Image (cartoon, grey):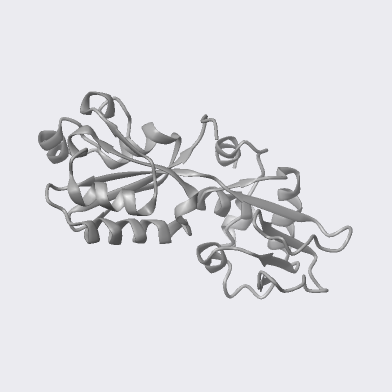
Amino acid sequence: ARRVAKAMGGEAVVTTATDAQGLPAFDETAARLGYDLENPSQIKALNSLLLEGGVVAIRGAGNRFRDVYAGRSNVLQVGIRDPWPANAEGVVRFGDDSGGAPSAGVPQLILKRVPVAVGIGCRRGAAEDEIQRTLAAAMDELDLNDRDIRAAASIELKRDEAGLVSAIRKRGWPSLFFPAELLKTVATPNPSDTVEEATGTPSVCEAAALLAGQGRLLLPKRVIGRVTVAVATWEKHED
């Protein structure tokens, strides 16, 4: 819990009890899917309700966050325009939820999407539609929209890769290209000797995402056909 809290800039919360019962703590789910806690002081109250069977309402969450708690009788999924249930003992809401706060005295946890950088690798000649499919699959894993992505990054030798350049341009993202010498200095979880032989660096998508975002790896390398994608949090930048 302390490791997760440090990565998210919040306070450590003991979540062993929720883990033991197969109940992912709200802060752990938020960290995994790329959300910041706007009010981390509330996480203990919400996790306690989750563990003890108290009624928690979630409004405005993406599909992946909702899926984690689907089937839990004490976790109510509320539509973005629906009022808070009268029996809710605590609520989890998202930064774009404009539906108003719950009743006075009901603890609420507010989550805000962390902006990200996307790292992309591809074999020579990969078509734009291949790249778009891989991007869409990776984004779906984290409930990301195009507006959540601050930049797409790759290796310098792909600067003139037509399919890659076109895919990034159509999504409206700024592009960054890093030399192999710089990419190879970045520690990544999935280095490849084959990739290093071909490009001069053992990692392209993960290293590029980390260099661009200057944060933590949110989604390790995903491979579909001739394309690889990774996602890292976007930190230490001026927005």
Query: Residue, x 62% and y 57% (percent of image)?
Result: 18
- Out of 65 and 164, give the one closest to the viewer: 164
Q: Which image quarter is the C terminus in? A: top right
Image-quadrant location for residue 190: top left
Examine the rendered structure and indicate whether residue 135 appears above or below residue 151: below
Residue 170 in percent (x, y) is at 33, 54
Residue 73 in percent (x, y) is at 66, 75
- Out of 65 and 115, give the one closest to the viewer: 115
Say whether residue 171 is visible: yes
Q: Which image quarter is the N terminus in? A: top right
- Out of 162 and 123, give the one closest to the viewer: 162
Query: Residue, x 36% and y 60% (percent of image)?
Result: 136
Query: Residue, x 83% and y 74% (percent of image)?
Result: 86
Image-quadrant location for residue 39: top right
Residue 126 in percent (x, y) is at 16, 53
Residue 65 relative to residue 59: left or right:
left
Image-quadrant location for residue 53: bottom right
Q: How many labels, in total?
A: 0
Say whether residue 221 is visible: no
Examine the rendered structure and indicate whether residue 187 appears above or below residue 113: above
Residue 168 in percent (x, y) is at 32, 49
Examine the rendered structure and indicate whether residue 84 appears above or below residue 19: below
Query: Residue, x 58% and y 39% (percent of image)?
Result: 8
Residue 48 relative to residue 5: left or right:
right
